[in-house]
Image: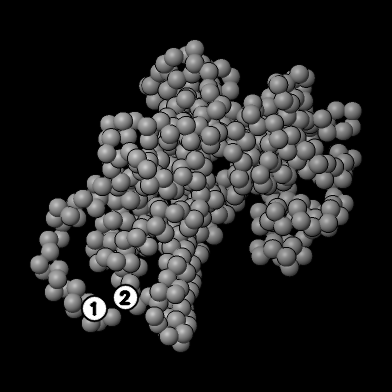
Amino acid sequence: MAETAVVEKKQAVSEPLFGKKEKKLITDPLGDNNPITIQVLGICSALAVTSLVVPSLVMSVAVVFVCAFSSLFTSLIRTKIPKQVRMIVMLVIIATLVTVVELMLKYLNYPIYKQLSVYIGLIITNCIVMGRLEAFAMANKPWRSFLDGVGNGLGYGVILVAIAVIREIFGKGTLFAGSAVEMKIIGASNEVTSYWINTAAESGIGSWFSWYSNNNLMVLPAAAMFIIGIMIWIQRSYRPHLVDIS
Amino acid sequence: MHSTNYVIMFVLALTSLVAIGLTTLREVTFDTAEMNKAIFNKREVIKAVADHIGLEPGQKVADLPNERVLEIFENDIKQIVLDMDGNEVDQNTVQKVYKGGLAEHIDMSKEKKKDEKDRLLPLYVYSKGGNTKYIVSVIGSGLWDEIWGNVAMESDLNTVVGASFDHKGETPGLGAEIKDNPVFAAKFRGKQIYGDGEIKLNVRKGGAKDATYDVDGISGATVTADGVTEMLQRGIAYYNPYFSKIKSSK
């Protein structure tokens, strides 16, 4: 362990801490190498948690954390990991970090933990995390692996929140429901939604398009599938080189 | 390729390290987490009597500071544990099963797995200024997993003054509305529980027909709503023996 640390230190001097390559590690997953729209990974949770914005945001933060630190730790011990059991070792690291997230949520904000408990556990099964460890962290140095983890976590989070915004507005007519800044965006002030209308009126934000009635399809996971499909379509029409010809 | 011995040692070392780390973290955070959980549960009970605890206009139970929640529970709420025959169970007996031995310590989900005749029932009596409300806890099944709730009633043991619901894994936006949309719980206010000697309070799909007993269902969440009805009718009936004792002693 000590030996490799020394070797890395020597090389680190010749490499910039945040050069062009490092920057690319963050920006690539946000665009041309997005884990959801290009690699089509992490779809399961992208369908499951995106009916509301607030849980999606917390989920994104948790995934960035798990992805970044599992990459860092895996990269730190990558030369020591026996190849035969590397998957299990990665899984142990991921599961540990997910448990840390769960414990910290219980400690810091119990209501959010109650709201998300099922989804947090789902991070373990998120293919993006495992995929980055196998494809990148096992072959790269800790700092760059960490950046790669952050980038992919963000790439996942950006899409997640974008889907959630669309689904929440058209499915419930609200935005940030369940948080302190919840607001009513569109929809009629019928009895069922009057609570949201009242809170919107209090916060000074009116409701537009009162003729709109909530689309229940948007609440169901299938809507996320359509939205992801449309996102992939738009992205590939602007970036023809991403289209897989085979 | 590493040797088998190396693999075994590596895995053992890694898992021990992880186990020690996680155990330590859990130990350090445990007390605060338990406290958070207790306050969370107390808040759920208080939500059922939200109209009577002197909230300022626009203030929600969720916004109450933790100290205030503990204070209300300490001063205004009497906790009683009942058995299925309507007898009060003393704290020491309950303590054998649940640490603490009060109604708030009862794990409803464990009680649900017991035989019906052996169950323990938590009852909270809220009284302030000669104003008495009874809060009962109920548990049942929704579409995906458990749902549970607290129902508060007037001292006539018939008129609902409020309710709060929660769930483990109902669909967000559909079944989860029983918790997320406060309007659903608010609709229970003023409903009657008993009619002709049986529990008639229910959640009705397609809108309330009988304003005395029916609560509007949630569109797209029929199974969860039926679960709520079943939970209320079965769960409140458990308290019948105790309620008839109170009524006859009056």
| Marks 1 and 2 share the same chain | yes
Q: How many discs mark residues in the rendered view? A: 2
Q: Which residue is located at x 58 percent, y 19 percent? A: A191
The relative height of residue B204 versus residue A51 in the rendered view (above or below) is: above
Q: What element carries label 1?
A: helix
Q: What element carries label 2?
A: loop
**Residue nearest the viewer, comparing A222 with A33:** A33
Estimate how packed mark 2 is, as few (under 14), some (14 to 19) or many (20 or more) residues with alpha carbons within 10 Å. few
Could you tell me which chain the residue with mark 2 belongs to?
A: A
**Residue A85: x %, y % from top left:** 45, 73
Query: Of the residues shown, which amino acid type is indicated by label 1?
Result: Thr
The answer to whether marks 1 and 2 mark residues whose Cβ atoms lie closer than 8 Å is yes
* Residue farthest along the front direction in this orientation: A246
Q: Earlier in the sequence, mark 1 or mark 2?
A: 1
**Residue B104: x %, y % from top left:** 66, 54
* Residue farthest along the top direction in this orientation: A211
Query: Of the residues shown, which amino acid type is indicated by label 2?
Result: Thr
**Residue A61: x %, y % from top left:** 37, 49
Marking on residue A4: 1
Q: In this view, does A140 lie to the left or right of B243?
A: left
Q: Quadrant of the C terminus of chain A?
A: top left
Q: Is residue A177 visible?
A: no
Q: In which quarter of the image is the N terminus of chain A?
A: bottom left
The relative height of residue A18 versus residue A238 in the rendered view (above or below) is: below
How does the figure colour the protein chain or chains? one colour
The relative height of residue A44 versus residue A97 in the rendered view (above or below) is: above
Q: Which residue is located at x 57 percent, y 54 percent? A: B38
| Residue occupied by mark 2 | A79
Tag nearer the camera, 1 or 2: 2
**Residue nearest the viewer, comparing B83 with B234:** B234
Could you tell me which chain the residue with mark 1 belongs to?
A: A
Q: Can residue A164 be seen in this view?
A: yes
